[in-house]
Amino acid sequence: MVERLTWKKLALELAFFYLPWFLIGWFFGGLPWLLLLATVLVLLWNFYHQLKLSDWLWKERSLTPPSGSGSWTPLFNGIYRLQKRNRRRRKELANLIRRFRNGAESLPDAVVVFEHDGSIVWCNKLAQDLLGFRMPDDAGQYIGNLIRTPEFIEYLSRAELGEAFEMRSTLHASKTLEFRTMPYAEGEYLMVVRDISQLKQLEGMRRNFFANVSHELRTPMTVLRGYLEMAEDPDMLVGPMWDKAHGVMTEQLTRMESLVEQLLTLSKIEASVKIALDQKVDVPAMLDVLEKEAQTLSGNLAHEFEFEIDHSLRVLGDEDQLRSAISNLVYNAVKHTPPSAKIRVRWFRTAKGPRLEVIDSGEGIAPQHIDRLTERFYRVDKARSRETGGSGLGLAIVKHALNHHESELEIKSKVGEGSMFSFTLPERLAC
């Protein structure tokens, strides 16, 4: 290993070089000319090694230093060690940057790094999809030129680090974005952008849900309170008035009980994120029971029922959820079909899998309502639904129960002719 160069070593090397020239000039004469010649040789020797050093630094790509002699050897090796150290550090830095970018790409949020003047340094792929940035083309661009909204420019000028800022996406009007900015490195900031559209939608659904529940419960509770206040008068507890009041209160209590039961059923089904579809469900036996219940529910309406059932066709799934889905479809047909009209229920095998169809000959549903029928509390005719005891939760229960069985509700309807509600289970669930 070559030791580093010191002034003592350099002085000793020069002394050994000049000593022979000095002795020759001392004994034979011409000392000044010999010393001048020795100095010229030293300069030429140094000039030669400077050229070698320059060629190595600017032309050659090899890490190995050129061969040198004397005081130039530790210089070449010192530069070689410095270059080797710098390359190692650059490699470590490149690995660090690569790990950071890989980590940023794995984040579920868009990430943008920009300088204090707003010029973009880097962003991940999600930022390119969510904000429309293009890298590396947009590197160095002012971020306000790419997100051209007054509220965003104002947010940047306020520099409220850590504070959340929400705005509509400039690319997708249906999306709501949340921005958070925080210090990152010296003179740089890190902006995290999250798509909160679904969260906003869920918040809206939750508000509507509680508003609808409150509204649905308020009506029967108001009726009950009114009759209970009337019952404070002893004269009201006798005669035909009490029979009427008792019937109305019983009807309203039944309505509230049905609403609470359906809410609990819907909550239970929604809470079951994943269920094991390994329970053998006897759908034909279930439909036999539902046929009798539908006739009882029909009562004086005298509907004409036709059940076509493949009694050999059973399926794997969750029995409670399938019963909730099928019973709601059959009960809805009874409630929304005019008296003496025909209701047809079919359970049969198709090439795609077991299929259930509930066909009525009712008034039908206008096309603008069909896509919203499975929303909670959505009803085409609210007045008529209240008369029939409908809560607006039945088809929502059907939708979620079928989703757990890898199926979906199909609705076909024509105004004045009737409707068909159906679903097809995967063939692998047939048994």
Image (cartoon, rainbow, N blue to C red):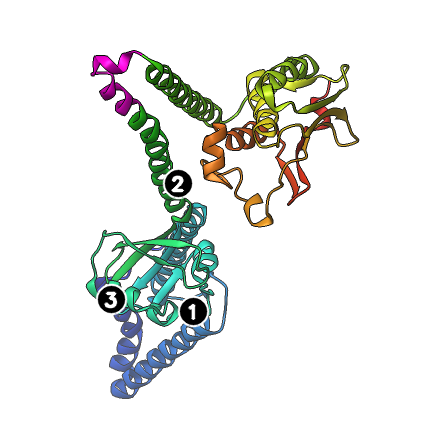
Q: Earlier in the sequence, mark 3 or mark 2?
A: 3
Q: Is residue 66 left or right of residue 35?
A: right
Relative vertical location of residue 113 with respect to residue 27 in this rendering, above or below: above
Find numbered disc 3 in the image and state the secondary structure of the residue it sits on: helix
User: Which is more toward the observer, 9 or 324?
Assistant: 324
Q: Earlier in the sequence, mark 3 or mark 1?
A: 1
> Mark 2 sits on what residue?
205
Q: Is residue 165 left or right of residue 345?
A: left
- Direction right: furthest residue: 351
Find numbered disc 2 in the image and state the secondary structure of the residue it sits on: helix
Badge 3 local density, few (<14 within 10 Å), some, or many (20+)? few
Question: Residue 367: x, y in percent?
Answer: 60, 48
Q: Earlier in the sequence, mark 2 or mark 1?
A: 1
- Say if mark 2 contacts mark 1, CB within 8 Å: no
Query: Would you say residue 261 is visible in this rendering?
Result: yes
- Residue 154 numbered tag: 3
* Residue for point 26% across, 23% down: 225
Q: Amino acid at mark 3?
A: Glu
The quadrant where residue 331 appears: top right
Find numbered disc 1 in the image and state the secondary structure of the residue it sits on: loop
Q: Amino acid at mark 1?
A: Asp
Q: Distance between the Cα atoms at labels 3 and 2?
A: 31 Å
User: Which is more toward the observer, 348 or 413?
Assistant: 413
Question: Residue 84: x, y in percent?
Answer: 40, 57
- Magenta-drawn segment: 224-238
> Mark 1 sits on what residue?
138
* Residue for point 33% across, 37% down: 211
Relative vertical location of residue 315 with respect to residue 106 in this rendering, above or below: above
